[in-house]
Image (cartoon, rainbow, N blue to C red):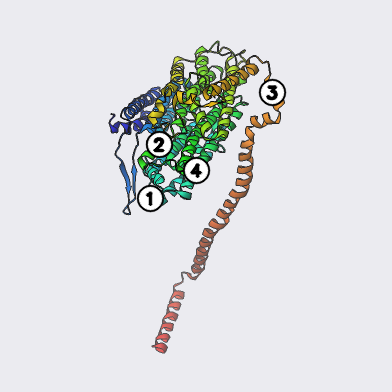
Amino acid sequence: MIPYQLIWLIMLLPLFSFIINGLVLRQFINRKSKLYGYVTITAIAVSAIFSIWALLSVAANNEEIIIPDVSWVVIDNGVNIHLGLIADQLSTMMAVVVSVVSLMVQIYSLGYMHGDEAGYYRYYTYMSLFTFSMLGLVLSDNLLFTFVFWEMVGLCSYLLIGFWFHKKSAADAAKKAFIVTRIGDFGFLAGILILFFNTGTFDIKELHELAITGVLAGTVLMWAAIGLFAGAMGKSAQFPLHVWLPDAMEGPTPVSALIHSATMVCAGVYLVARTMPMFIYSTEAINIVAIIGGFTAIFAATMGLAANDIKRVLAYSTISQIGYMMLGLGAVGMALAGEISGGELHLGTEEMLIIAKGAVAVGMFHLFTHAFFKALLFMGSGSVNHSTGTFDMRLMGGLRKTMPWTYATFLIGSLSLAGIWPLAGFWSKDEILVSAFESQKILFYLAMITVFLTAFYMFRAIYMTFHGEYKGGATDDGKDHHHTHESPWVMVGPLVFLSVLAVVAGWWNLTGAFNHFMGHEAEAAASVAGGLFGAFTHTVEGIPLPLISLLVALFGIFMAYVIYNKKWITAGSVGKVFGPLYTLVYRKYFFDELYENIIVKLVALKGLFTGFQLFDSKGVDGAVNGVAEVVTAGGRAIRHAQTGQLQLYGLFIGIGLAVIGICVYVFG
C-alpha cells in the first residue's frame, strides 16, 4: 500500500517544478536552457511513478486510500471547509492518464520547441502549472477545491493557447477559449452554490449519500446537476459551447496533445463521472447528458469531414469522442435511473454508492484509451508540421516515404480511433455501443453513424497527408520544405511509446477487468455487460454488435480510400452533389458567425453592453459626480464669506453677541 503522503506528492511535484522554473532558475540561468525542460520532466516522471503505484495499490486492495483532510476555514456555525484528496479507482486512473501523457508530451517538447528558445522557460513553467492543476482537479475530494483547480486549468489553457501572443490569431483564440468556457463555469459555480446552500457541504461523498437517501432530491438536485453539466459542457467543448476548441489549435502542438485532447477537455467527463450518483437520481439531468453527448458526437464528426487543417480535424475528432464518452456515461446512467424510478433497485446506501461508482466504467474506459491514441495523433501532426512547415493537408502528401516512423505511429493511432480490432479503441468503443443499444436505440444509431464518420475523416487525413505525391509544404515561412525528413528521436520516441499504448490499453478490459476494477458488475446494473464476451452477447438480427461496428468502420476506411487514394470518385464531385450541405459543414454550421457577428457584436455590444455602459456612465458615474458637484458648490459658496478682512469679522462677531444678548433678555 502506498503511503498517503505520496498521494500529495503526485500533485505537488509539478507545482515544485513550476516554482523552480518560474521563480528560481530564471533568476540564475539563461532562459533558453534545456534545464527548464529537464526539471519539468523529472518532476512529472516521479509523479507518474507515484500515480501508477497508487493505481496498483487501489487495485490490489480493492478499496480507496484514506487520506486525512486539512482544515482550511472553520466557522462557528459548523461550516468546515477542508482541503482533501481522494484516491480511489476513478481518481488514480485519471492521475495515471494525466501524468503519463504529460510526461510523454514534455519529452516530445524538447524537440518540438527547439526552435523557440525565447519562450522555453515560459513554456515549461506553464506546463508544470497545468499538470499540477489537472492533478489537483482529479484528486480533490470536494467541489469547492475542484472548482479552484478547474479555474486554474482554464487559466493555464488561456496562457498556452496564446503562448505565441505576438500572433493575433493566437491571442484571439486564447480570449475566445477563456470567454466561452467561462459561460459553462458560471453554471458549474451556480450548481455548487445550490448544493452548498441546500446541504451545507461541499464534500462529494456526503453529497452522494444525500442524493441516494433522498435528502437531496427534486428540483434542487435537478438544477444542481444541470449546473455541474454546464461546466462540463464548457471544458469538454460540447454543443453548443464547442466553438473554442478548433481555434485553440493556434497554441503549440504539444499543448494540443496534452490539454486539448487527453486531459483538460476530459475534465468535463471526469466531473460527470465523479458526481454520477447525483445524476442518476435526477432523470432529467442524466437524459440531458446522454442527448447532448450523442448529438455532439455526430455533429462534430461531420465538421471533421471538410476540414483541411490536420490539427482541426483532430480537434473535431476530440469533440466528437468526448461526446461519445458523455453518451456512454449517460446511457448507463439512464438505465440505472430507470431501474431506480421503476422500483427495481432496493439497496442500501453503500450498495448504491458501489453501483453508481461502477456505472462510470463504460465512459471512463473510452477516456482511458482515447487519451493515449489522441495524444499520439496530435503529436504525429506536430511531427509532420516539423518537417513540412504547415498543417494544411492540401500541401502535404507522400510523407510515408520520408517519415516512416511518424506514418506508422499515426496509422496505429488512426486505426485505434476508428475502432479497428484488436487496437484499444475497438474495446472501449463497443462498450459504449452496447450501453446505447440497451438504453436508447436512437442514441445507438447516432453512435453507429459516428463510427463511420470517424473512420472516414481519419483515413481522409492519412491519404491526404502520407499518400500520393508531396505537394511542397509551406510556402510562406521563408524556408525550404521540398526535402522532408523524419523528426528527431526525442520526438519519435514518445510517438512509439504512445502507439504501443494505443494497441494494448484496451486489453485491460478483454474479460471485463477494467469494469471490475471500477466496481461495475453486470448483475448490479443489468442493462450493461462488461468486457469482450459481454459485448458479443448483444446482437442485431443475429449479428454481434462488435462485428457490426467493425464492418461499419471498415466501410468508412474503404470510402476514404476510394475518394482520396484511388480517386475513383473525386472529392470535388462529392462536394457538388451535396452542394449546400457541404458548404454548411465546411463553414462549421455558421456557429462562429452566429456567436461573433450576431450574439457578440449585435446583441451584446450594441444591445446589452451598450445598456450597461449607459447605466454605468449616466447612472453610477452620474450619481457620484452629482454628489461631488453638490459638495464643491457648497464649498464655493462658503469660500465667498471668507474675505480675510479683520474688521468685517469683528463686525459680525459684535452682531452675533448682540443677537445672543437680546435672545437671553427676551426669552430668559
Whether label 1 touches label 3, CB < 8 Å: no
Tell me the crowding category of disc 3: few under 14, some 14 to 19, or many 20 or more residues within 10 angstroms, Cα based: few
Q: Nearer the viewer, residue 598 or 458?
A: 458
What's under tag 1, amino acid-wise?
Answer: Gly
| Residue 283, disc | 4
Please name the residue that numbered disc 1 is placed on: 200
Q: Residues within 10 Å of mark 2 (few under 14, many from 20)?
A: many
The label nearer to you, 3 versus 2, is 2
Asked whether disc 4 touches disc 2, contact meaning CB atoms under 8 Å apart, the reply is no
Q: Is residue 162 visible?
A: no
Query: In the rendered image of this protein, does residue 345 appear above or below residue 504?
Result: below
* Disc 1 + disc 4, Cβ < 8 Å: no
At x 49%, y 15%, the residue is 487
- Front-most of 213 and 9? 213
> Residue 543 versus residue 270: which sits nearer the camera?
543
Which sits earlier in the primary sequence, circle 1 or circle 2?
1
Q: Which mark is residue 355?
A: 2
Q: Is residue 269 left or right of residue 604?
A: left
Q: Quadrant of residue 238?
A: top right
Residue at image coords 62%, 13%:
468
Amino acid at pointer 2: Ile
Relative to 265, residue 217 above or below: below
